[in-house]
Amino acid sequence: MKNFNRIFKFLMLGFCFIAAGCDDYLDINYNPNNPTDAPLAGLMSNVTYETSQNVFRIGSSTSYYVQYLASPNPASGTDVMDPLSFDGTWGSLYAVMTDLNDLILAADENNAPHYEGAAEVLMALNLAMTVDLFGDVPFSQSFNFETVTPSYDDDEALYSRIFDLLDSGISNLSIDSDASMGSDDFIYGGDTNQWIKFAYMLKARYLNHLSETGAYSPTEVLTALDSGFDSNGDDAQVEYFEEANNPWFQVARSNANLVLGGWISEQFVEATDGTTFGVMDPRISYMIGTTDEGEYVGTVNGAGRGSASEQGERSTLVEGDFYTNPTSPVLIATYAEQKFIEAEAAFGIDKARSYQAYLDGIRAHMTKLGVPDSEINAYLSNPEVAMGVDAFTMADIFKEKWIALFLHPEAWNDARRYDYAYEDFDLPENLNPDLNGQFIRRLRYPDSEVSRNGSNVPDVTLLDPIFWDE
């Protein structure tokens, strides 16, 4: 991918705008991110970098819900799906959306349609991540500085807004312009063709979220994908560098220093070590670490480390694997994910296409990790994986997509759409009793919102689904 020699310079410039972001919609007297004061390049560097950070921030919590990770401590709040307050996540999402709003306005003022289009695509992404976590959220009144208690917009209506933003972004990115992005864009280095592919891929992702609703159109999903990614080289990602290490590397490094985090769920270990599906997945050694004895041993969600008295008796994220190298990218949207979206959408229309997309998705992810071709071919020739078109099921798609989305927040959206029906997928021990033996369906609204905007905060529980989770 791109080598951004000036990434640190632009990142430091972008940091100038971060502190003002979280509560901008509460400040009705002064907008410190006024478009006339905020250089396009500084805002662009900030929103591309912080969007990748938001993907990490959300994934660092939802990875427990989909049992990639498990806490070493029994009855840990995230593990057992307690009603936690995600104030930091909420604040980070709104900080980026505030800066994106400013970037859209500034780009429009300065006749810079490529900046405006990229900002609209990222606004759609960050808004979608917010809706997918919480449901109804403030948006239409969040950036006009006219109220300290913005109303909440309907989650289904906000999805229409997401599609409008993506369509507008594609239109703006397609305009010829001399005001071009460059190395201030940490995702694509200013390549508008890549941004357009990214927008179409996201459009397919969010159209596919509607799979349980009457609005679902697999044909629309496939049409969007026709203009999406063509290979791993199109992946939307932010590559990190020595001055700002990959955040999952920081988790692995902290874990090595006994600041415990990044312990691997028994569910994920057994799904990839041959226990659950009867085939050893070669990706396991590129994704997680072994015990001190060279074995893969997971931690049961909700139970903690059990009889293990030492850290080295359980598998964890370790430094130097694909996701945990200091300069590893944070993956925002990938060709592998797109192929699994294609497999799901085509399943009832053209099962042969669906099956091929499923196989292509596995290969794309394995290639991304650096798995040798011989090991990829061996896995793809195993009858447990290459079962043939007739025996191929939707469960096979969701299982392989779950592996390919390791640590990514999109995996929780899939889990809810799929009703957590993965093979041998058990509820965590010591489950939050208020869930009545069910899996969590949304996050609780943060304490900061309840305290300052409580009259508008919807009265919902952790079991109330997002509109698309019917």
Image (tube, grey):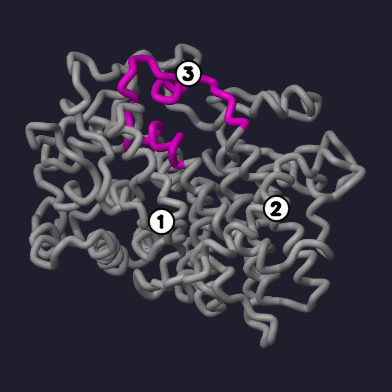
* Residue 136 percent location from the top left of the image: 68, 38
Quarter where residue 179 is shown? bottom right
Label 3, secondary structure: give it.
helix
Q: Secondary structure at mark 2?
A: loop
Q: Which residue is mark 2?
A: 17
Element carrying mark 1: loop
Q: Of the numbered discs in the image, which one, if any, rests on residue 242?
A: 1
Residue 133 image position (x, y, % from top left): 56, 38
Crowding around mark 2 (Cα neighbors within 10 Å: few <14, some 14 to 19, many 20+) is many
Can see residue 351?
no
Q: Nearer the viewer, mark 1 or mark 3?
A: 1
Task: Judge whether 61 appears above or below 123 on screen.
Answer: above
Amino acid type at mark 3: Leu
Q: Kindly identify which numbered label has been placed on residue 435.
A: 3
Mark 1 / mark 3, whichever is N-terminal: 1
- Read off the magenta span: 59-87
